[in-house]
Image (cartoon, coloured by chain):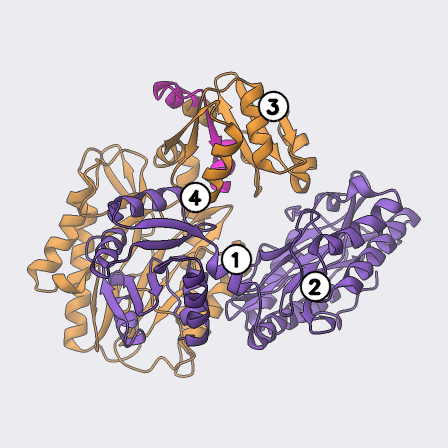
Chain colours: A orange, B purple
Amino acid sequence: MRKDRIAALIEGLEKNKLDALLVMKPESVKYLTSFSADNTALIIGKGKKIVITGFIHAEEASEFFRGWDTRIAKKGIYAEIGRAAAARRIKRLGFEALSLGFTQYKNIKRVLKGAADFAATDAVESLREIKERGEILAIKKAAAITARALKEAKRGLGPNATEASVSRHIKRLFIKYGAEGPAFEPIVAAPPASSRPHHIPRAKRLGRRNALLIDIGAKLNGYNSDLTRMCRLGRIKPKFLDIYNITAEAQNRAIARVRPGVKISDIDRAARGHIEAKGFGRFFGHGTGHGLGLEIHERPYIARNNNARLKEGMVFTIEPGIYIPGLGGVRIEDIVYVEKNGCRVLTDDIDKSI
Amino acid sequence: MRKDRIAALIEGLEKNKLDALLVMKPESVKYLTSFSADNTALIIGKGKKIVITGFIHAEEASEFFRGWDTRIAKKGIYAEIGRAAAARRIKRLGFEALSLGFTQYKNIKRVLKGAADFAATDAVESLREIKERGEILAIKKAAAITARALKEAKRGLGPNATEASVSRHIKRLFIKYGAEGPAFEPIVAAPPASSRPHHIPRAKRLGRRNALLIDIGAKLNGYNSDLTRMCRLGRIKPKFLDIYNITAEAQNRAIARVRPGVKISDIDRAARGHIEAKGFGRFFGHGTGHGLGLEIHERPYIARNNNARLKEGMVFTIEPGIYIPGLGGVRIEDIVYVEKNGCRVLTDDIDKSI
């Protein structure tokens, strides 16, 4: 149970004049309580700690949620949400607007029968945007497995390896080294296919030209990691080396700007501006980075239109790239976290040379 | 491209007086086109084949969707959906109510600016409920990897194995044998913890009593499989053997009833009725099975309140169970598909003895 997080959540709800929040996203349930389960709902407010689950998780929920109003739904979770809201006289119930499905929303509106307002919030995502020390450590541990698997996979890059075989190798290593598995399907892209940022690995030999793009991340204890490196396959053409160097410099410039109070769009600008100045702006069409934690993509999004400001404890990737159809692509990605006076790169011990 | 499936979809839309369907769920996009991508939308209707994607998938989409109205969204996918609907004069646009998020729904309503109705449908899920021969074969191939991994994992069940080590072993075997990975996190539960249907494997020795519950599935080429077997750990107590035999008989009775035209609730009843008659009704609190294919849980749901009727080509699990706190649980799960005159068990070559 994470009483500190629940207390912070309730404080935020009161400011937004919500009696309680309905929490159904598994990552949110885990974040607030440490309980891992699907199809389980929490209703949390001042003086209200309600958990609703079905037969599947009844035994462990009854044991885990001591002191909570624990309700085992016999006729579906939605009906029980309605009953609980009525019994506890909830008049204004928040919901997780970023994860609730349209049909779930309709079902819950129906069971509330108009007795309670049902208001969109991003309360849990807001809390999760600022990581605690323990969370940063969890991401760092996941990243260490990623780095170890990458190092071993690089040694196996021979003339008979294929994109798909490298991907499989890395996934097996993740599990061997204790991870749950990959945070996302590995992206292993030989040139020229690496001009496609989310290329799907094929059963195709890697060849001996330029460098292989490997974008991977292990998931450990629910926390995700994410890392992209370029691995030399043979002779690097001057133009390929050019885009590699420009991308590396763009990443350095973005990382150098990371500290509390900086506008997030300025981080994006630092990377994008350099790539644009070198004439490759139209070959860098995605955002500069994304937060990560219990989800592989979460706040903050390091994008040109994000006017929020960095805060201490935010953790995100910095991953500019240049993608040229016919030649191939370069992306370099590290995880950084915002410290009091600047930032730390969580993945800076992982060889970045091409 | 799956022109046959797209044609069937369009036929269904016309019956529902929809000009077009907005398809955003990755499994639906893959089902209709064979294109694998996130953050990609299709708008499909009579004379309308529109694909909207961002920079990430621009190159492969432009290459893949020959003859389509291909739109690379520069300012977000939602704005481009609005522009496409206006340009193509769509008045009544369907959306996938079972997968669209509340916030996505709001965003799309906004960009449609009231110029088009936005109507909830389950058009793609309805098509997907009936599998083609190729899909049944794909599930069968995934199940074959599951069976192979289970067989090998069973040989490794020694006194030093833990639930977590068995789970890890199986996940590595899945990848070794060519699967993308697990369809879901393996459930490996030693008694008495197996009384929790979705128990999370722990770093705890398996012990020498009764039988281990292993519920696993490999995912191959996007298709999921699902299988539960009880693996003997040592001496089986009479009561444990009892619930095993009752569960096995319940499963046999349900499978025996599977054929086109049968009410789905009757399949559930066949299993549940037997367990109830033996006095264990309250220890079987979940549904009797679920469809599977591109998703691990999809239609049809074999539940007591599902009054639909079975149709040829449906593929689903039959997985009754009895879960007794303090003793442990039993579940036996196979995949069946509905044939013209009955059904076939896709997983019947996998040893079921305790």
Instruction: Give the residues in magenta.
Output: A10-33
Q: Quadrant of the N terminus of chain A?
A: top right
Q: Quick one: SS at disc 2?
A: loop
> Residue B204: where, in percent of width, then height?
69, 47
Residue B63 percent location from the top left of the image: 28, 76
The quadrant in which the C terminus of chain A is found is bottom left
Q: Is residue B296 left or right of residue B74?
A: right
Q: Are marks 4 and 2 in contact (CB under 8 Å)?
A: no
Q: Amino acid at mark 4?
A: Phe
Task: Determine whether label 2 and label 3 are within 8 Å by CB.
Answer: no
Q: CA distance from mark 3 to mark 1?
A: 37 Å
* Residues indicated by labels 3 and 4 sit on the same polypeptide chain: yes
**Which mark is nearer the camera, 3 or 4?**
4
- Residue hosting label 3: A68
Q: Nearer the viewer, mark 4 or mark 1?
A: 4
Residue at 18 percent of width and 37 percent of height: A262
Chain bearing mark 4: A
Number of marks in the image? 4
Would you name the residue on which mark 2 appears?
A: B261
